[in-house]
Image: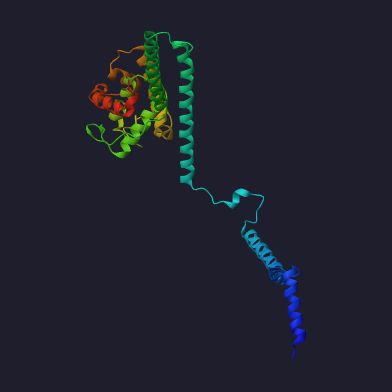
């Protein structure tokens, strides 16, 4: 048994701790740090293996993604689906509307720069209340005039293009017009509308002549060699040429427009008869009122 030696060793340990040579807390801390270093050293190979596996998986996913891409890399457009016809029309409509609104903004800005500086001059300090009221009145009057001019410009832009299909409320020879008759009249009136600066009576003469001659039908046959909406004969051209509505309408307008401008007071029946040469010239007068109503509906806000 260890009696004397053990007692001496225990006594020496206690004396060493009292003298500050070895402290229990320091010994425990050093042991824990040594244990952590051992664990970290053992875990390093596992971390390296995990990092290597992550890199391999990432490269594998990148390879699969590239395999799904289109093979024709020189043509990037082929990677996208084709745009449908409806989508193309929608894109064109949006582009036209954007261009139209841009033109409106340019017009409005031009008018602002043109009118306002000339109306009230530079913005100097206001000397008195009457001067301020006068300047405010000037601003309001200029703004009203600009709004009126803008509405007129907007109406002119709208009236430049072709007008829409005539509604189902119009009549032909006092009967409700069919879809075919409405299409014929709309195409004929739009052809005349492209001429610009045409008087209302010219439109009216065209509609009355088409109503009497063909009841607003593009007839492939009629009396003798007469065909088309105005029943033109062989001396005016081929059958295919006469069945083309714009050709017949332009032939009619080429004779009516100069007569109407030279003789504004010329009766409607005489104006039509000079161009048509009908055997029944008085028959056009019975459709004058109906033709006037049709032209009013066709022109809409463009009628003045």
Residue at x 27% of width, y 26% of height: 291
Q: How is the image coloured?
A: rainbow
Q: Nearer the viewer, residue 254 or 21?
A: 21
Q: Position of residue 136 (x, y in %)?
A: 38, 14
Q: Position of residue 211 (x, y in %)?
A: 29, 30
Q: Position of residue 120 (x, y in %)?
A: 44, 11
Q: Residue 92: in sight, yes or no?
A: yes
In the rendered image, which quarter contains the C terminus?
top left
Vertical order, 29 against 122 (above or below): below
Report which quarter residue 108 is drawn in.
Answer: top left
Q: Nearer the viewer, residue 192 or 15?
A: 15
Report which quarter residue 12 is drawn in.
Answer: bottom right
Q: Nearer the viewer, residue 154 or 108?
A: 108
Considering every residue shown, the one lying at the far bottom of the view is: 1
Left/right of residue 118 with respect to residue 183 in the rendered view: right
Left/right of residue 88 with respect to residue 257 in the rendered view: right
Left/right of residue 78 with respect to residue 143 in the rendered view: right
Q: Residue 235: in sight, yes or no?
A: no
Q: Position of residue 231 (x, y in %)?
A: 34, 30
Vertical order, 49 against 9 (above or below): above
In the rendered image, which quarter contains the N terminus?
bottom right
């Amino acid at each position: 048994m260890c009696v004397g030696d053990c007692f001496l060793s225990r006594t020496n340990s206690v004396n060493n701790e009292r003298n500050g040579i070895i402290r229990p807390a320091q010994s425990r801390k050093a042991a824990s740090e040594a244990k952590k270093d051992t664990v970290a050293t053992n875990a390093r190979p596992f971390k390296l293996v995990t990092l290597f596996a992550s890199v391999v998986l990432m490269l594998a996913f990148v390879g699969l993604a590239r395999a799904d891409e289109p093979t024709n890399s020189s043509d990037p457009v082929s990677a996208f689906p084709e745009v449908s016809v409806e989508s193309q029309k929608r894109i064109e409509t949006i582009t036209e509307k954007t261009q139209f609104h841009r033109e409106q903004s340019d017009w409005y800005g031009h008018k602002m720069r043109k009118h306002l500086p000339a109306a009230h001059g530079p913005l100097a300090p206001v000397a008195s209340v009457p001067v301020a009221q006068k300047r405010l009145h000037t601003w309001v009057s200029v703004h009203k005039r600009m709004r009126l001019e803008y509405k007129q410009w907007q109406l002119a832009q709208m009236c430049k293009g072709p007008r829409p299909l005539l509604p189902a409320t119009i009549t032909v020879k006092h009967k409700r017009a069919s879809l075919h008759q409405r299409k014929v009249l709309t195409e004929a009136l739009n052809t005349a509308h492209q001429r610009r600066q045409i008087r209302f009576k010219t439109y009216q003469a065209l509609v009355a002549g088409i109503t009497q001659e063909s009841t607003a039908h593009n007839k492939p046959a009629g009396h003798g060699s007469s065909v088309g909406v105005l029943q033109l004969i062989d001396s005016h051209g081929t059958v295919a040429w006469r069945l083309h509505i714009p050709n017949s309408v332009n032939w009619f307008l080429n004779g009516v427009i100069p007569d109407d401008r030279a003789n504004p007071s010329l009766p409607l029946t005489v104006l039509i008869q000079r161009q048509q040469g009908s055997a029944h010239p008085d028959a056009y007068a019975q459709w004058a009122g109906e033709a006037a109503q049709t032209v009013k509906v066709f022109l809409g806000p463009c009628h003045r």
